[in-house]
Image (cartoon, coloured by chain):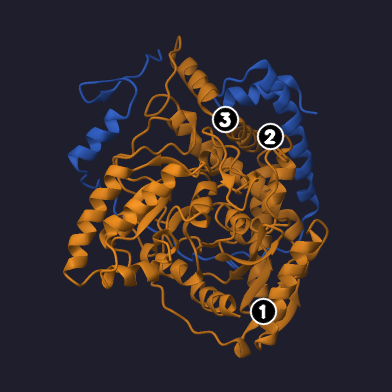
Chain colours: A orange, B blue
């Protein structure tokens, strides 16, 4: 087996048994990344990676070392790694260097992780295809004429193409799960509050969550365990300790939301998802059709709440504190020009939508209404989880699409996240795992759980992986 | 369709400079998206406050500044495009 094909657990065993060193592993990955034509990385942190690998090898030599020690990973370029560039794939932060580590990075570093580089994304994590990156789109390793999904495009492509053992991504409306489905890897979006957001460049703060992208479910569990927990730097993080669960299929009630199998879902995707549900049924699970009646409103609700928060969060990029600054005749002129020149089309569009929705006279009709609808969406899920343990549904209505196919029609692009957005509005955890293919194109199953029940999701997913 | 004037007004509120071409495209895109939002008007179900929410309590901390490492503070100032003697320079607003 090639060094770059190993999972976390396999690589850990190899390091323990002295089959190879962390420096060997790291060099194998760096070589692979440099030869890649996928545009999955925005920067390679070679010097840092090699220094970390050498440090890890010293720790490994003592015989006692944590699971992630010496394991090479990559980080979405919206998450800060001290001393390294953090661009959010935007021209406005093209030369921005992170002044401190995100909490998740601190936690990985404490274990002795090796950071290979920063991965590509849609600008400021806004997009469903990776095409909104100011530095070029990431190609899907399964079919290079197609998108990798988004916004964590580089993070999923890197794992799918063996350019990192695991990566971190972030999910605001589906940005981990949807690209994981498009590229055929495992992606976990944790419960809102399970993982600290400190050091993640903000998109929409009531929705953003960092999560792992891995080759299998076991690895996702390892990373989730490593990065989750309360952080005093993020008031929305929760005092939560991951505990492994062993769910038996014969005691499991799986809900299948009928609204997720309605018009718009490609028949071939539906068939693959139905087959997975059948497998769970054959393994002893009880399948219950449920209804989430507010589903049809979720997308509109999300595209009011998200952009409203964006219009506030991105106001800080004003050419004064950091990033691109364009000379102007007065202060206002500096703001106008720096933002006008620095932001790409989708970011501008969302700032405009958000500003519109929050502007005087429109607030009640849009933002306030959307908050009410968000509560309806939450209620739907809360009612469903009184009846069932987990939900099984598609991740996206279609597999990876061609470059340019949806670029000029924002609304059709937004539909790519139609099954990941509702649970996100409710702050629920969701996992995407590859369960089939249409030709070369992977299709992911989404497993949604109740708040802080990642353990149930992961237990069921890891059993399903083996069926 | 939302008017050119309206787009210009929102862009000004957002502190965004848009080209003529961008304004035109924005009129089209925003109109389509805002029309789609009309869907929400038909959403009506009884609200059960708090049902399904993760957080039941606020998070407070003492109103006290945390010590920050000097080197981090220096890096933050360093990131500013225009600075002098440890201060960020801003154009006069009066």
Say if A66 sits above or below B78 in the image. Answer: below
In the image, farthest residue toward the front = A1
Seen from the viewer's position, the closer of residues A126 and B50 is A126
Q: Which residue is mark 2?
A: A361
Subunit that carries the residue with mark 1: A
Q: Residue A346: which numbered mark, if any?
A: none
- Element type at mark 1: strand
- Is B4 left or right of A431, judged from the image as shown? right
Q: Which residue is mark 1?
A: A254
User: Which residue matches tag 3?
Assistant: A344
Of the image marks 2 and 1, the number of the one nearer the N terminus:
1
Looking at the picture, does residue A77 appear above or below residue B3? below
Residue A126 x, y percent position in the rendering: 57, 42
Q: Residue at x 66, y 21 (%)?
A: B8
Check chain identity for marks 3 and 2: say if they share one: yes
Gap between marks 2 and 1 measured at Cα: 44 Å
Circle 3 SS class: loop
Mark 3 chain:
A
Residue in the image at 43% along x and 24% along y: A324
Residue A232: x %, y % from top left: 32, 57
Mark 1 to mark 3 CA distance (whole Å): 42 Å
Q: Label 2 is found on which chain of the structure?
A: A
Q: Nearer the viewer, residue B77 or A160?
A: A160
Using the numbered discs, state the Cα–Cα distance from disc 3 to disc 2 in whole angstroms.
28 Å
């Amino acid at each position: 087996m090639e060094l770059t094909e190993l999972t976390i657990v396999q690589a850990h065993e190899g390091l323990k048994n002295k089959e190879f060193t962390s420096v060997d592993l790291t060099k194998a990955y760096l070589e692979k990344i440099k030869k890649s034509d996928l545009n999955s990385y925005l920067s390679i942190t070679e010097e840092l990676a090699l220094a970390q690998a050498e440090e890890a090898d010293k720790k490994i030599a003592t015989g006692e070392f944590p699971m992630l020690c010496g394991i090479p990973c990559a980080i979405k370029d919206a998450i800060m790694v001290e001393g390294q560039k953090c661009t959010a794939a935007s021209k406005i932060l093209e030369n921005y260097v992170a002044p401190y580590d995100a909490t998740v990075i601190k936690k990985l570093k404490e274990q002795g992780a090796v950071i290979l580089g920063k991965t590509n994304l849609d600008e400021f994590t806004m997009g469903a295809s990776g095409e909104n990156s100011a530095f070029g789109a990431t190609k899907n390793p399964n079919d290079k004429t197609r998108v990798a999904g988004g916004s964590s495009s580089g993070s999923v492509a890197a794992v799918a193409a063996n350019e990192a053992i695991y990566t971190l991504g972030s999910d605001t409306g589906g940005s981990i799960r949807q690209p994981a489905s498009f590229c055929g890897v495992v992606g976990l979006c944790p419960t809102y509050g399970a993982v600290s957001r400190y050091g993640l460049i903000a998109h929409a703060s009531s929705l953003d969550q960092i999560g792992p992208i891995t080759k299998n479910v076991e690895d996702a569990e390892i990373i989730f365990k490593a990065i989750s927990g309360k952080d005093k730097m993020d008031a929305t993080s929760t005092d939560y300790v991951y505990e492994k669960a062993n769910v038996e299929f014969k005691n499991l009630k799986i809900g299948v939301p009928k609204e997720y199998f309605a018009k718009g879902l490609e028949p071939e995707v539906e068939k693959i998802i139905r087959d997975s549900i059948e497998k769970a049924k054959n393994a002893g699970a009880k399948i219950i059709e449920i209804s989430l009646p507010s589903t049809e409103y979720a997308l509109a609700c999300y595209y009011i709440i998200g952009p409203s928060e964006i219009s506030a969060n991105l106001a800080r990029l004003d050419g004064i504190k950091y990033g691109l600054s364009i000379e102007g005749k007065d202060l206002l002129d500096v703001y106008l020009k720096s933002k006008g020149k620095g932001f790409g089309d989708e970011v501008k569009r969302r700032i405009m939508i958000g500003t519109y929705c929050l502007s005087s006279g429109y607030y009640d009709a849009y933002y306030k209404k959307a908050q009410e609808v968000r509560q309806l969406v939450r209620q739907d899920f809360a009612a469903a989880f009184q009846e069932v343990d987990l939900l099984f549904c598609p991740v996206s209505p279609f597999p990876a699409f061609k470059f340019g196919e949806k670029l000029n029609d924002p609304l059709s692009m937004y539909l790519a996240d139609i099954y990941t957005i509702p649970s996100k509005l409710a702050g629920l955890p969701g996992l995407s795992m590859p369960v089939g293919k249409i030709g070369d194109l992977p299709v992911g199953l989404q497993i949604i759980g109740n708040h802080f029940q990642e353990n149930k999701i992961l237990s069921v997913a890891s059993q399903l992986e083996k069926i | 369709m939302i008017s050119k004037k309206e787009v210009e007004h929102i862009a000004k509120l957002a502190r965004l400079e848009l080209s003529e071409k961008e304004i035109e495209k924005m009129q089209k895109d925003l109109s389509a998206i805002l029309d789609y939002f009309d869907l929400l008007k038909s959403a009506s179900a009884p609200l059960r406050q708090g049902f399904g929410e993760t957080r039941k309590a606020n998070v407070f901390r003492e109103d006290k500044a945390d010590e920050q490492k000097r080197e981090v503070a220096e890096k933050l100032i360093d990131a500013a495009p225009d600075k002098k003697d440890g201060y960020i320079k801003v154009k006069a607003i009066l």
